[in-house]
Image (cartoon, rainbow, N blue to C red):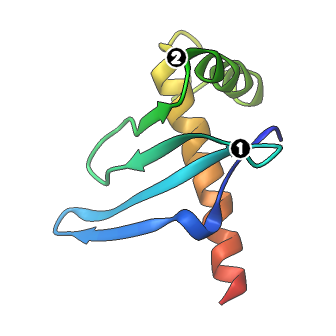
Amino acid sequence: MPFCIDASSIAFTKTRRGINARATILSEDGTRIGEISDIAERIVADVEFVSLAVRSAFVKEARNVNPTVFGRADHNDEVFASEYARALLAEAEQVLLARM
């Protein structure tokens, strides 16, 4: 997978509505390409990128990995980026838990 989450960068914040997570997204060579802010009560997580080119590559990979989100393929790019980043975050959380 050409992208991953830096497990050591995950920061959890407990709120009255759930647990929020923030983490750094890395490319396969370890370069910081963006950040995910997964807010508990939001359907779509905020994903910010360092450039439009990186965003485009991330969305392209997201659409290849998971061609349908919520049972549909016609969502905008933000939904695909969000779900892909959340999947990467879940993998990184497992790595973090395995280290404990």
Which residue is the extreme one toward the top?
A: 74
Splitting the image into 4 quarters, where does residue 2 fall? top right
Task: Answer above or below: position of 46 versus 11.
Answer: above
Point 83% across, 44% down: residue: 29
User: Which of pointers 1 and 2 indicates the residue nearer the eye?
Assistant: 1
Q: Position of residue 12 (x, y in %)?
A: 39, 69
Which of the image's four quarters has the C terminus? bottom right
Tag 1: residue type? Thr
**Direction from residue 59 to residue 12 in the image, left or right:** left
Task: Answer above or below: position of 70 versus 9.
Answer: above
Question: Alpha-carbon distance for marks 1 and 2?
Answer: 22 Å
Which residue is the extreme one toward the left?
A: 16
Q: Position of residue 92 (x, y in %)?
A: 65, 62
Q: Which residue is mark 2?
A: 77
Task: Answer above or below: position of 71 versus 87.
Answer: above
Between 68 and 10, the one lying in front of the other is: 10
Could you tell me which secondary element the residue under label 1 belongs to? loop
Tag 2: residue type? Asp
Could you tell me which secondary element the residue under label 2 belongs to? helix
Point 57% across, 42% down: residue: 85
**Direction from residue 73 to residue 67 in the image, left or right:** right
Q: Are marks 1 and 2 in contact (CB under 8 Å)?
A: no
Q: Position of residue 51 (x, y in %)?
A: 55, 22
Point 41% across, 59% down: residue: 21
Sequence-wise, the earlier of marks 1 and 2 is: 1
Label 1 crowd (10 A; few <14 / some 14-19 / many >=20): few
Between 9 and 40, the one lying in front of the other is: 9
**Direction from residue 25 to residue 76 in the image, left or right:** left
Which of the image's four quarters has the N terminus? top right
Task: Answer above or below: position of 21 versus 28.
Answer: below
Which mark is on residue 31? 1
